[in-house]
Amino acid sequence: MLKRERRVHRGLVRTFQINQLFGELNVVESLGLVISERRGHGRDWFRTAGTLAGMEDEIAGLVGDFGLDTVLDQPCSSLPYGKQRLLEIALAIACKPKVLLLDEPAAGVPEADRHEVLARLSALPKDVSILLIEHDMDLVFNFADRISVLVAGALFAEGTVAEISTDPRVKEVYLGGANHA
């Protein structure tokens, strides 16, 4: 089994249901650290950040793509929770993944911010394969191309959004059926 760092360098990146951020760093510093590490300069990221070609442009692009421009200088620990979720996804994208695993990206996000999270997810690069683990079916139906439904850890149903949203078995288990956990 490969170590985490090796998996990331090979293009497999994930986010967590509970944010894993650099609490004392701000948005720019956090993105700079991840980009520096990806480029092989992680240990010297403060010293080399200003000298890495294109780094400032890459940070600015991610900040704009994820709507973080209003919170640039705030410590990550003090960001509103929706912005923390967006930053964590931005950090994952800064790793240049081929496959991105998103573990409940809308979990705990206030309703007012969920639309922004969904919009940012929908705008993720199309060349990145995304595996979304999510219980919010509205988010799943608006985001996914294909859906795999699991029950007790086993594959229960698989298909397009239209197929899954109209499957009576899925409706029974997940979308309102009684007596199911």
Image (spheres, rainbow, N blue to C red):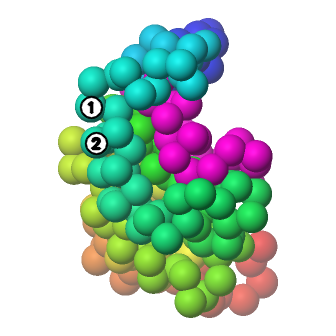
Q: In the visual, does 106 lie left or right of 53?
A: right
Name the residue carrying label 2: 57
Kind of residue at badge 1: Gly
Q: Residues within 10 Å of mark 1 (few under 14, many from 20)?
A: few
Q: Quadrant of residue 17?
A: bottom right
Kind of residue at badge 2: Asp
Q: Quadrant of residue 93?
A: top left
Span shown in magenta: 9-37
Element under label 2?
A: helix
Residue 54's disc is 1
The reply to whether callout 2 and callout 1 are in contact (CB within 8 Å) is yes
Q: Is 27 drawn above or below residue 169 in the view shown?
A: above
Taking the image as drawn, is residue 4 in sight? yes
Residue positioned 58% across, 41% down in the render: 30
Most distant residue in the left direction: 126
Residue positioned 72% across, 89% down in the render: 178
| Residue 34 falls within the magenta-colored stretch | yes
Residue positioned 57% across, 14% down in the render: 44
